[in-house]
Amino acid sequence: MHQVGVELASLSSDTSVVIGVIQVSGVGPVAFLIYIDDLAKLLESYGVIVKLFADDVKVYLQIAGADDVTKLQYALDLITQWADEWQLISIAKCNTLSIGKTPVDAQFHIHHP
């Protein structure tokens, strides 16, 4: 017999925050979008595609050369700086994912404070 375990939910550890909005409030998603709009516009100005949904931020870019590698890493660095300033994104919960048939000779990093 083969058993498979599934974790249905997990909780983050407690931490003190300087500002915030109660989760599951109607104001939360709107407040987040107001705050994050400047980050989205900044990243788009560097040619990085940004997708926002509630409190999720996804950035991506087709890598055709070394300039694109630099551009995407710079975008990840901007996100880290923005998250440090506004404390609205948990960098510790972020990940990078490479998708495609051709391997890219680069490793992208999200700097955890």
Image: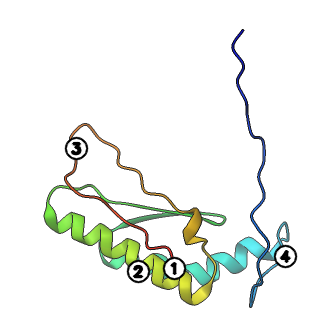
Q: Where does the image place residue 77, in percent across and percent down from the top left?
A: 39, 77
Q: Earlier in the sequence, mark 1 or mark 4?
A: 4
Element class at badge 1: loop
- State the CA–CA distance, disc 4 to disc 3: 42 Å
Question: Which residue corresponds to mark 1?
Answer: 113
Residue type highlighted by circle 4: Ile
The relative height of residue 112 versus residue 86 in the rendered view (above or below) is above
Q: Is 49 rendered above or below residue 34?
A: above
CA gap between label 2 and label 4 equals: 26 Å
Specify which label sits upstream in the sequence, 4 or 3: 4
Circle 4 is placed at which residue position?
A: 22
Q: How many marks?
A: 4
The CA distance from mark 1 to mark 3 is 29 Å
Q: Is residue 11 left or right of residue 89?
A: right
Q: Along the horizontal axis of the image, is 54 left or right of 46?
A: right
Q: Quadrant of residue 73?
A: bottom left
The location of residue 95, given as percent across then percent down, is 48, 58
Return the mark for residue 78: 2
Residue linked to disc 3: 103
Q: Secondary structure at mark 2?
A: helix
> Hey, what amino acid is under mark 1?
Pro
Badge 3 crowding class, 10 Å Cα cut-off, few under 14, some 14 to 19, many 20 or more, is: few
Asked if one can make out residue 91 in the rendered structure from this viewpoint, the answer is yes
